[in-house]
Amino acid sequence: MPSAPDDPTFWQSRADEARASATQITDPLCRTAMLALAARYERLASRLVKGEDIFDTTGRMRLAADNAPTKSQVP
C-alpha cells in the first residue's frame, strides 16, 4: 500500500479496503457507514487526481473541495 497521503493510490487503496471490510459486516448501519467511508476515500483520491490540494497551509485536511485552490492556483 502506498504510504503518502498526497498520493491518490493511497486513498484508492483505503477505499478498496473499506469496501472489502463492508462485505464482512452484518449490521446494516455499520455496513452503510463503512461504505460511506469508502466513498469519502474515493473523493479524496479523485480530488488529488484533479490536482486539488487536500491539505491547508497548516497540514490539516480540507473538508470541502468547493473552495480549495488547486496546486496551480497556490502561489
Image: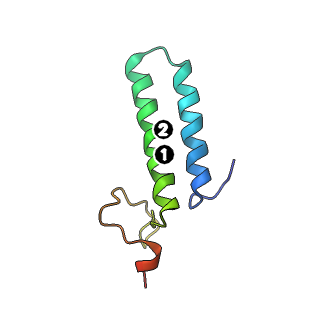
Please tell me whether mark 1 sits on a helix, a strand or a loop: helix
Residue neighbourhood size for the residue with mark 2, other residues' Cα within 10 Å, grouped as few (<14), some (14–19), many (≥20): many
Tell me, yes or no, whether the two marked residues, 1 and 2, touch with CB atoms within 8 Å. yes
Residue plotted at (54% across, 40% down): 15
Q: CA distance from mark 1 to mark 2?
A: 5 Å
Q: From the top left corner, tell me how far across and down residue 33 is, in percent.
A: 40, 30
Q: Residue at x 36, y 56 (%)?
A: 63
At a point 46% along the width and 67% down the height, the residue shown is: 53
Residue 15 vertical placement versus 20 (above, below) = below
Residue 52 rendering spot, x and y as whole percentages: 45, 66
Which quarter of the rendering shows the C terminus? bottom left
Amino acid type of the residue that numbered disc 2 sits on in the rendered structure? Ala
Q: Which residue is farthest left?
A: 67
Give coordinates of residue 65: x percent, y percent. 35, 60
Q: Nearer the viewer, residue 3 or 41?
A: 41
Q: Secondary structure at mark 2?
A: helix
Outermost residue on the top side: it is 26
- Foreground residue among 12 and 37: 12
| Residue hosting label 1 | 41
Residue furthest right as drawn: 1
Res. 38 mark:
2
Residue 6 point in image, percent of width and height? 56, 61
As drawn, which residue projects farthest toward the bottom?
Answer: 75
Q: Residues within 10 Å of mark 1 (few under 14, many from 20)?
A: many
Toward the viewer: 65 or 61?
Answer: 65
**Residue 40 falls in which quadrant of the image?**
top left
**Mark number, residue 1:** none
